[in-house]
Amino acid sequence: MKIKALILAGGQARRFGGGDKGLALLDGRTLIDHVLDALAGCEVALSANGDPGRFDAFGLPVLEDGEFTGMGPLAGLAAGLQWARDADVLISVPCDTPILPPDLIPRLLPGPAYARSDGRDHYLVASWRPDCLPHLLAVLRAGDSLKVEGLTRAVAATPIEFTGGNRLFANINRREDLDSGG
């Protein structure tokens, strides 16, 4: 099975005070580095708009949202699915979710599926098959609800329960969250 992965790093980081969240440091390493650990063995791309040069140190392709710029994470996911057309599965992870289980990828296969932990759904920590792309493009072009939850329902994604405490899948929304690990 050919698996590719996408790190969503294109948010505006309003609650974070702006800047690139993925480049922020947690325990001395960037958030992107933490996510890359969980995606080891996959061909990985970053979803981000603007100057791709700021991510040169990672040596990864940087995908822009193209015609869907400004339409949120579904736009990044669409770019990722287009990039991963030759794969069987695309794993997506937001850059601000650095605490991931070591068995993330095998548990999300074959997809579509998304992570659930401690009663919370993590719709962007997910696996997507290429056949999700036409539906996603139709949603984006229609300007319908741009909620990831709606896409997971539309493609009948399965929730996969993970256990590991409240730090697992912790979301870094504010700079203060870096001190507490989410």
Image (cartoon, grey):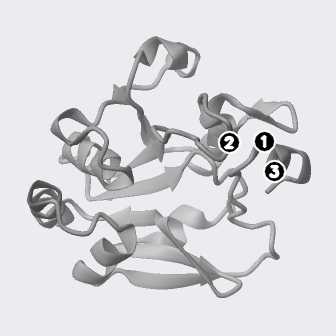
Indicate the quadrant where residue 45 lies.
top left
Type of residue at label 3?
Asp
- Residue at x-position 30% and y-position 83%: 153
In the rendered image of this protein, does residue 154 appear above or below residue 86?
A: below
Q: Nearer the viewer, residue 22 or 44?
A: 22
Q: Which amino acid type is marked by label 2?
A: Phe
Mark 3 crowdedness (10 Å alpha carbons): few <14, some 14-19, many ≥20: some
Residue beneath disc 1:
175
* Residue 38 drawn above or below residue 29: below
Q: Is residue 38 left or right of residue 49?
A: right
- Percent position of residue 143, x then y: 16, 60
Q: Residues within 10 Å of mark 1 (few under 14, many from 20)?
A: some
Classify residue 161 by image quadrant.
Answer: bottom right
Q: What residue is disc 3 on? A: 177
Could you give the CA–CA distance between mark 2 and mark 1, rounded to whole angstroms?
Answer: 6 Å
**Residue positioned 31% across, 76% down in the render:** 150
Badge number at residue 16 = 2
Badge number at residue 24: none
Q: Which residue is painted at 42% across and 18% down in the image?
A: 52
